[in-house]
């Protein structure tokens, strides 16, 4: 049995659900409060990406003790990105390392694939990748602060070079010549070359009591087909699930994922109306040049546009419509349906207005700066989409209602 900690995961939780479901391994989706109240059982806890701080808050002191007890007694902990950060010294304390802060915000806004050097000899590394260079996906990662003495932490992979689809914020790194990057650094003090690629750890592992953990700032749950190279991530995740949970040995890669292509199993009027409205918002944002396709499950976004929230809503709605409407879900949704419908109507009107206003602000930036007050756009965005770091806003209320169905 696998337990999945859901809090503050959003789209990354849905990617992990897709991956785990494909293996047929029994699993449970838990909130931090569940773990705090009832503890953990089974073989493994997987914590998807998202905000490490908000995950820690959801667990609270009691939940954190339960996780540590679970691993100390022989359980396995697998954390991706925010789930990796949660396990560090200032969080759960499973790993003695800390997170490395970033003074340059651009160094965090890295997404796509990086070439990584994989260690040659460790049972947690799939033989197909051991000792080789692998393309591994990162989506706005944090960084490990590697001390001079590694405290028995095993580094399983290190970043080496940009992959062909790497973006820095909304700019494709491969389209920027080296001489122009040097010129920008000299003239403007802007460094777009990701510091991640300077040999920093990407995947690390270690033990805690009788148990063990693996932390990866690469999203190993990234579906196959997102870009050539994502199959390396799936190979690694399936290897870990085989070793720790008995995943089928005949699976060689994770299945592809297209949220828009998931079949509708739940013909609920409020969910279908929301799906139509969200599609209209996404089409408008793409027409305005504020969102753009990255792969089958992710839309990229212009800097400053709340693309993460749009992606999470798209994943949540598509998954909800793909759920079988059993008695428990129907009872829950009957109590939530009208609130959801009313909230989504407000969100649709507000988000449509904000997208158009944001595009107008871009148009006026040179010819009439200040005509559309930036503070007004910021306040409206906060009410609709909350903070990128701390969540909130009307979109999070909608996500919470949808995620209860999972």
Image: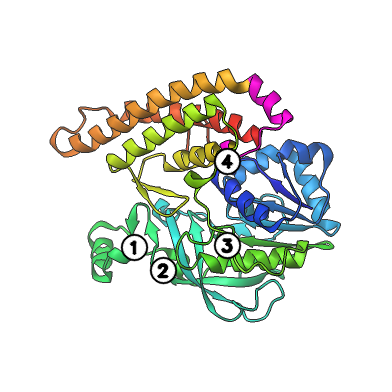
At horizontal 62% and vertical 72% (from top left) the residue drawn is 156
Could you give the CA–CA distance between mark 4 and mark 3, rounded to whole angstroms?
A: 36 Å
Q: Are marks 1 and 2 in contact (CB under 8 Å)?
A: yes
Task: Label 2: state its secondary structure.
Answer: strand
Mark sitting on residue 162? 2
| First-in-chain label (3 vs 1) | 3
The residue that disc 3 covers is 145
Could you give the CA–CA distance between mark 1 and mark 2, rounded to whole angstroms?
A: 8 Å
Task: Label 3: state its secondary structure.
Answer: strand
Give the main secondary structure, helix, strand or loop, of the magenta stretch.
helix
Mark sitting on residue 173? 1
Nearest-to-viewer mark from 4 and 2:
4
Q: Which residues are magenta?
A: 321-335
Residue 388: in sight, yes or no?
no
Could you give the CA–CA distance between mark 1 and mark 4, rounded to whole angstroms?
A: 32 Å
Any magenta on residue 214? no
| First-in-chain label (2 vs 3) | 3
Task: Label 1: state its secondary structure.
Answer: helix
| Image vertical order of residue 66 relative to residue 203, above or below | above
| First-in-chain label (1 vs 4) | 1
The one nearer the camera, 226 or 250, is: 250
| Residue 331 locus on image (x, y percent) | 70, 24
| Residue 220 locus on image (x, y percent) | 58, 61
The one nearer the camera, 122 or 268, is: 268
**Badge 2: how crowded within 10 Å, few (<14), some, or many (20+)?**
many
| First-in-chain label (4 vs 3) | 3
Mark sitting on residue 319? 4
């Amino acid at each position: 049995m696998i337990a999945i900690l859901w809090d503050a995961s959003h789209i990354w939780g849905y990617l992990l659900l897709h991956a785990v479901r494909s293996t047929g391994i029994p699993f449970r989706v838990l909130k931090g409060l569940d773990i705090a109240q009832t503890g953990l059982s089974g073989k493994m806890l997987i914590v998807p990406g998202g905000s490490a701080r908000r995950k820690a808050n959801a667990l609270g002191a009691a939940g954190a003790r339960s996780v540590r007890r679970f691993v100390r007694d022989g359980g396995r902990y697998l954390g991706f990105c925010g789930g990796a950060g949660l396990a560090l010294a200032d969080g759960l304390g499973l790993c003695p390392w800390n997170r490395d802060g970033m003074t340059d915000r651009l160094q965090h806004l890295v997404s796509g694939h990086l070439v990584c050097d994989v260690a040659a000899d460790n049972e947690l590394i799939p033989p197909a990748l051991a000792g080789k260079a692998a393309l591994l996906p990162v989506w706005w990662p944090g960084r490990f602060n590697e001390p001079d003495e590694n405290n028995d932490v095993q580094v399983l992979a290190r970043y080496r070079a940009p992959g062909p689809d790497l973006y820095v914020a909304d700019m494709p790194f491969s389209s920027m010549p080296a001489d122009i990057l040097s010129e920008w650094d000299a003239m403007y003090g802007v460094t777009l070359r990701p510091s991640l690629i300077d040999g920093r750890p990407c995947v690390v592992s270690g033990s805690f009591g009788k148990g063990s953990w693996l932390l990866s700032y690469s999203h190993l749950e990234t579906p196959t087909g997102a870009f050539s190279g994502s199959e390396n991530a799936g190979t690694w995740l399936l290897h870990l699930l085989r070793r720790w949970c008995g995943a089928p040995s005949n699976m060689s890669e994770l299945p592809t994922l297209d949220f828009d292509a998931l079949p509708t199993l739940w013909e609920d009027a409020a969910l279908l109306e929301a799906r139509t409205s969200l599609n209209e918002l996404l089409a408008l944002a793409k027409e305005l040049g504020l969102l753009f396709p990255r792969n089958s499950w992710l839309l990229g976004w212009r800097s400053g546009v709340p693309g993460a929230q749009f992606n999470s809503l798209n994943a949540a709605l598509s998954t909800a419509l793909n759920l079988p409407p059993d008695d428990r879900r129907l009872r829950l949704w009957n109590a939530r349906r009208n609130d959801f419908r009313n909230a989504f109507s407000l969100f649709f009107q507000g988000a449509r207005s904000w997208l158009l206003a944001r595009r107008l602000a871009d148009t006026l930036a040179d010819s009439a700066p200040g005509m559309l007050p930036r503070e007004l756009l910021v306040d409206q965005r906060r009410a609709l989409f909350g903070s990128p770091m701390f969540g909130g806003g009307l979109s999070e209320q909608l996500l919470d209602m949808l995620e209860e169905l999972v």
